[in-house]
Amino acid sequence: MDNRNKLTVRDFSFYYGSLQALRGVNLNIPSNEIFAIFGPARSGKTTLLKSINRLTDFIFGARHTGTIHLEEIDIHDPKMSPPHLRRRVGMVFDLPTPLPVSIFDNVAYGPKLNSITQKNRLNEIVEKALRSAVLWDEVKDRLHTSALRLSGGQQQRLCIARVVALEPEVLLLDEPCSGLDPISTASIEETLVQLKEVYTVVLVPHNIQQASRVADRAGFFLNGELVEEGSAYQIFTKPREKQTEDYVTGKFG
């Protein structure tokens, strides 16, 4: 594998029983970039995201061919346990799902599971994660109040902080702004741009405009196939494929 790539997808196809959701996808995702996966509904975007950290393992009758490598390791290698993979590759879903406990305990939950119990160390981890998610200044005076009292945008950033607290290498985000207002969306986008300095970010954006604002590179998916990938500027201003151009310019989708 090319060590410059954090993720390498080779001839990857995915099936839900007899339904093929991904068709021979080949993709390189370099480290410390935001890579946007975009396309219409049922184009395979979320399936690829879930495949990267093996959440698809839980789906009865699902199977795949081809490989996904995290750096040099095949994620389906028996030596790579799913819990270890998910510590290295964290995922944030479209709907924020804070735990019904305090803001502090939400972020400290993962580290505590990993046997970190020293109070000073937990304080450091929580502050660092909340700063990474651009949430610290808004909640530092109420860390021990319920996370359920936060706004939708704050809850989503809290979920990002909860994943970041485990110090993964890759962040997968599936439409993290789909239910948020424009101000909250702008906060999340600011967060993502800061996070790529430390992490590799794979994003299914809420819309094309979001992809064009934050992505370094992008891939257009249609009917389970990767139609085109390249720099975000090229994809959104000078797409090579007519299908990409039609989607980007709003002729379909």
Image (cartoon, helix red, strand yellow):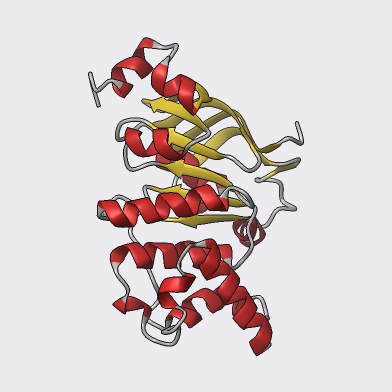
Vertical comparison of 215 with 80: above or below: above
Q: Which residue is drawn at 47% across and 79% down?
A: 140
Q: Residue at x 47, y 55 (%)?
A: 191
Task: Say whether residue 227 is visible.
Answer: no
Quadrant in which the C terminus is drawn: top left
Q: Which of 48 and 191 is in front in this view?
A: 191
In the picture, residue 45 is in which quadrant?
A: top left
Q: Which of 188 and 7 is in front in this view?
A: 188
Vertical comparison of 23 with 85: above or below: above
State the image coordinates of residue 225 (x, y, percent, origin top left).
Answer: 44, 24
State the image coordinates of residue 210 (x, y, percent, origin top left).
Answer: 36, 39
State the image coordinates of residue 34 (x, y, percent, origin top left).
Answer: 53, 40
Q: Residue at x 29, y 16 (%)?
A: 246
Q: Which residue is drawn at 62% across and 57% down?
A: 82
Q: Which of 117 and 132 is in front in this view?
A: 132
In the picture, residue 7 is in which quadrant?
A: top right
Image-based side of 159 in relation to 108, left or right = left
Image-based side of 228 in relation to 164, left or right = left
Quadrant in which the N terminus is drawn: top right
Vertical comparison of 172 with 208: above or below: below
In this view, which residue lies farthest toward the front?
137
In the picture, residue 109 is in which quadrant?
A: bottom right
State the image coordinates of residue 220 (x, y, percent, origin top left).
Answer: 42, 26
Task: Say whether residue 48 is visible.
Answer: yes
How many numbered discs sit on the rendered protein? 0
